[in-house]
Amino acid sequence: MEIDRKLLEILVCPLSKENLIYDKENQELIAKKSKLAYKIKDGIPIMIPEDARKIS
């Protein structure tokens, strides 16, 4: 499922307030500064830092 591009333009990481990068393959939104990957379930981004996957 593809995320709405307009939604992607306004979403930011709740911790760092940075713009997010859409990872279509893994269905995640990546926050590089925060080093977090927010999962997208059924087209809805789960923007809870505690539920995000830590990335290196």
Image (cartoon, rainbow, N blue to C red):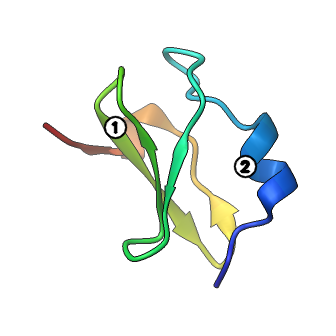
Q: Is residue 43 above or below residue 11?
A: below
Q: Position of residue 15 (x, y in %)?
A: 50, 17
- Residue at the far bottom in the pictured view: 1
- SS assignment at label 1: strand
Looking at the rendered structure, the kind of residue marked 2 is: Leu
How far across and how far down the image is residue 34, in percent? 35, 23
Which one is in front in this view, the residue at disc 2 or the one at disc 1?
Answer: 2
Residue at the spot 40% in from the left edge and 77% down from the top edge: 25
Indicate the secondary structure of the residue bearing disc 2: helix
The reply, left or right, for residue 7 in relation to residue 37 is: right
Given the current orientation, which residue lies at the most extreme right position? 6
Q: Which residue is mark 2?
A: 8
As rendered, which of 7 and 54 lies closer to the eye?
7
**Mark 1 surroundings within 10 Å by alpha-carbon count, few (fewer than 14), some (14 through 19), many (20 or more):** many
The x, y position of residue 48, in whole percent, is 52, 39
- The residue that label 1 is drawn on is 36
Vertical side of 29 occupied by 32: above or below: above
Q: How many marks?
A: 2
Graded by Cα atoms within 10 Å as few (under 14), some (14 to 19) or many (20 or more), the crowding at tag 2 reads: some
Quadrant assignment, res 55 = top left
Q: Residue at x 64, y 85 (%)?
A: 1
Q: Which one is earlier in the sequence, the residue at label 2 or at label 1?
A: 2
Q: Residue furthest left?
A: 56
